[in-house]
Amino acid sequence: MSKSRKRINITIPEDTLELIDRIREENRSAFINRAVKVYANRLERAKVKNQLKQAYQERAKEDLTAVKEWEPVERELWDKLEQ
């Protein structure tokens, strides 16, 4: 199954191009394609990780509120059990 390709023109600093040419083991297009995908995946994972962190923090606030609401009931039950 072949993937369609689109030709684009990009401008990059000469030292970046020299770096690419120095370390690549494939043609420039394949190297740049792979590098962009790796970088994009890292950004995507970081974004999801941050979203999860925010969601956990928000949920922690809700959980703390629930604990505080039920604390008197729990304390009453423990007092009854200790008698």
Image (cartoon, helix red, strand yellow):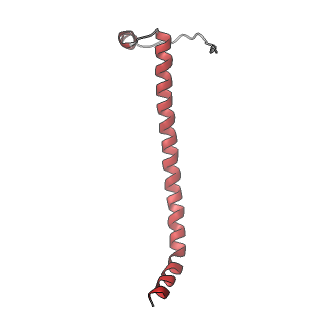
Q: Residue at x 44, y 87 (%)?
A: 82
Give whichever of 19, 77 is nearer the camera: 77
1 left or right of 77?
right
Q: Residue at x 48, y 86 (%)?
A: 81
Instruction: Give the quadrant of the N terminus.
Output: top right
Query: In the figure, 40 relative to 9: above or below?
Result: below
Q: Residue at x 53, y 58 (%)?
A: 59
Q: Residue at x 46, y 21 (%)?
A: 35
Query: In the figure, 33 relative to 50: above or below?
Result: above
> What is the number of callouts on the image?
0
Q: Position of residue 6 (x, y in %)?
A: 61, 12
Residue found at the far front of this picture: 1
Q: Position of residue 45 (x, y in %)?
A: 49, 36
Instruction: Give the quadrant of the C terminus.
Output: bottom left
Q: Position of residue 56 (x, y in %)?
A: 50, 53
Query: In the figure, 64 relative to 42: above or below?
Result: below
21 left or right of 5?
left
